[in-house]
Amino acid sequence: MYGDGSYSYAYSDGERMEEVRFCPEHGFYRGKECKCGKLGEVVLEAEKVEKVGRFMSGILRHFPDRFGLNVDENGWVNFESLVRVLKKKFKWVDKWVVKAIVMSDFRERYEIRGDKIRARYGHSIDIKLNDMPEADEEVLFYGTSEEEAQRIVEVGIKPVNRTFIHLTTSVEKSLEAAKQHSDNPVIFEVDAKTARRDGIKIVKANKFIALAREIPPKYIKRVQYSSYSP
């Protein structure tokens, strides 16, 4: 517990989990203050955000069949059906709890469209994500460990226990991801423009992350990330 009375919990990707608050003007957010500077009302404690978020992530990314949820080729499941599954485990969950988690998530892990919901990235189930927009960046980045760097130089970037590889739109985001697994991260630059020209499909999951099935060695090069620092 922090001095201001707020709580935080570690999430699966190393994020410090914060409570969700509601601002009458700007809606759901996480953190001490809304972007307008006002302190909104707490609608979901950090511990509950962590518990529901972890379970929801597992269902949407890895095991929807285990709970009888039908997932289409683009990763969508019925929103109300997901809420019912979550409610069986957490009696206090309703559709507004799920929406609060999704709409306040600055990492943009999830997407709600009409009566459907999906995880934007991180899947191990076989999906296509054909309805995501094509990434238009000329250069993307990938962070990894020193141990994996040589293998990548030889065989390219390939998914490990995931359907897609995760590329980032900035060096900073690649470093953030790589530092969760290595004290000495290595950054690769991906020539996304040429890769797309040669027929490699790269889609944009959100403003931070782009996805591809794999990136062959010819489109990548190891870089000194310090040269990209502001």
Image (spheres, rainbow, N blue to C red):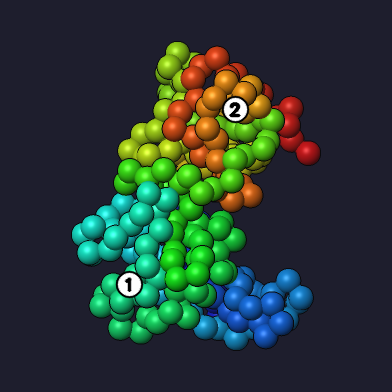
Residue shown at the point (37%, 75%) measured from the top left? 80
Taking the image as shown, residue 44 lies to the left or right of residue 40, namely left
Q: Helix, strand or loop at disc 1?
A: helix
Res 196 label: 2
Q: Which mark is residue 81?
A: 1
**Is residue 208 something that shows in the picture?**
yes
Closer to the chain start, of discs 1 and 2, is 1
Q: Residue 187: x, y in percent?
A: 58, 28
Left or right of residue 184, residue 169 in this image: right
Mark 1: amino acid: Ser
Q: Position of residue 169 (x, y in %)?
A: 64, 40
Rate crowding at label 2 as few (under 14), some (14 to 19) or many (20 or more) other CA atoms within 10 Å.
some
Q: Is residue 14 left or right of residue 28?
A: left
Residue 3 visible somewhere in the drawing: no
Q: Is residue 164 above or below residue 118?
A: above
- Tell me the residue at 74%/27% (across/down): 227
Identity of the residue drawn at 25% across and 77% down? 88
Q: Are marks 1 and 2 in contact (CB under 8 Å)?
A: no
Q: Residues within 10 Å of mark 1 (few under 14, many from 20)?
A: some
Viewer-side residue, 180 vs 80: 80
- Nearest the viewer among 120 and 34 is 120
